Image (cartoon, helix red, strand yellow):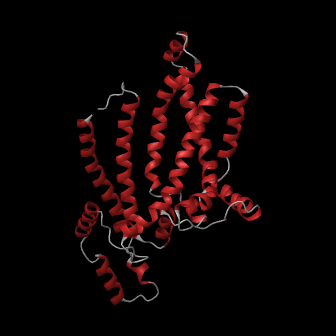
């Protein structure tokens, strides 16, 4: 196990280098000269030269790439072009609201999806299965924007059950007042595809020979499903969850924007709108690192769930 972890960590080095090279080419070569955007209407040769000097754009591409590599190695991406604040300070202030919203949504989504998927797979072809299938198919056919707009209008504006948007100062205030409506709408969007995906995993496992053998031994149906089927069906579920975790950094872009939640998603939208290249590059690198780390954790969890899995 230790040798596998060390080998995977070593493999992350060229992967991260490839990500850095791709990001640098996209922003510094293909993306054009951001000095013209920052100069605005007061464009002059002196101002352009000053901005290019401050951003290091007057250096050669090789020197610019080396500066970017040093930023990644030290995790110091400088200052935001929009707010003039240190990027790490901005991200540290924004990660909390995103984790509160996306993290709580992910936990509830996982628990409810697994329960519904197990039930519908167990009663395959029954009324419960058909009803859940119809609801999921209908839910997946509706755009997320419709959920947000209709939810804000009816649940927030008409019925006054929730605030339409906003963010408080305390953890409990946000969890009890401002998080419920965006979390509810987010769950309505994410539950349907996850239930369908997890259900297919349960159905595949229920058709395996070891399940028939367990039933032939006289084990109760509860033991067969909860002990044998659930354990093997968890592997694709773990894959799905681990793939979702890195995106907690970005947060729920649309939800945070529509509900004025000061999280990472809203910060990314503002950065893209203002062409804040350092902020976008920093978020991209952090997401890439998180993806590699959670992929490694997923492999370790596979081994923990099923000792027959060989890590090579």
The residue closer to the viewer here, 194 or 28, is 194
Q: Quadrant of residue 173?
A: bottom right
The residue closer to the viewer here, 118 or 65, is 118
In this rendering, the answer to whether 50 lies above or below 302 is below
In this rendering, the answer to whether 42 lies above or below 110 is below
Q: Quadrant of residue 4?
A: top left
The residue closer to the viewer here, 65 or 194, is 194
Instruction: Determine the residue located farthest toward the right in the rendered image.
Output: 158
Rendered location of residue 284, percent (x, y): 39, 59
Quadrant, the N terminus: top left
**286 horizontally vs 215: left or right:** left
**143 horizontally vs 92: left or right:** right
For the point 54% across and 42% down, which residue is it? Answer: 110
For the point 62% across and 35% down, which residue is it? Answer: 116
For the point 57% across and 44% down, which residue is it? Answer: 109
Rendered location of residue 67, percent (x, y): 25, 68
Rendered location of residue 235, percent (x, y): 45, 33
Q: Quadrant of residue 123?
A: top right
Quadrant, the C terminus: top left
Rendered location of residue 133, percent (x, y): 68, 35
For the point 30% across and 49% down, which residue is it? Answer: 15
Q: What count of labels does the image hold?
A: 0
């Amino acid at each position: 196990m230790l040798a596998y972890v060390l080998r995977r960590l070593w493999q992350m080095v060229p992967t991260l280098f490839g990500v850095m090279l791709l990001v640098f080419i996209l922003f510094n070569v293909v993306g054009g000269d951001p000095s013209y955007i920052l100069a605005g209407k007061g464009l002059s040769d002196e101002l352009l030269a000053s901005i290019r000097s401050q951003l290091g754009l007057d250096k050669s591409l090789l020197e610019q790439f080396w500066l970017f590599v040093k930023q990644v190695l030290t995790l110091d991406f400088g200052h935001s072009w929009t707010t003039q604040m240190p990027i790490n300070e901005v991200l540290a202030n924004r990660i909390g609201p995103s984790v509160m919203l996306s993290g709580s949504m992910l936990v509830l989504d996982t628990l409810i999806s697994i329960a519904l998927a197990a039930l519908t797979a167990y009663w395959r072809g029954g009324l419960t299965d058909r009803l859940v299938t119809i609801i999921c198919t209908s839910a997946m056919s509706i755009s997320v924007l419709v959920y947000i707009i209709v939810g804000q209008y009816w649940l927030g504006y008409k019925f006054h059950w929730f605030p339409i948007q906003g963010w408080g100062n305390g953890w409990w205030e946000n969890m009890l007042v401002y998080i419920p409506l965006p979390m509810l709408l987010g769950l309505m969007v994410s539950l349907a595809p996850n239930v369908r995906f997890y259900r297919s995993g349960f159905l595949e496992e229920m058709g395996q020979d070891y399940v028939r053998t367990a039933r032939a031994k006289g084990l109760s149906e509860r033991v067969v499903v909860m002990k044998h089927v659930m354990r093997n069906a968890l592997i694709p579920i773990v894959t799905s969850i681990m793939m979702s975790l890195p995106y907690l950094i970005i947060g729920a872009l649309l939800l945070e924007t529509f509900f004025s939640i000061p999280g990472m998603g809203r910060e990314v939208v503002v950065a893209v709108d203002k062409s804040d290249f350092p902020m976008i590059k920093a978020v991209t690198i952090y997401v890439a690192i998180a993806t590699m780390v959670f992929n490694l954790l997923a492999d370790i969890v596979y081994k923990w769930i099923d000792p027959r899995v060989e890590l090579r």
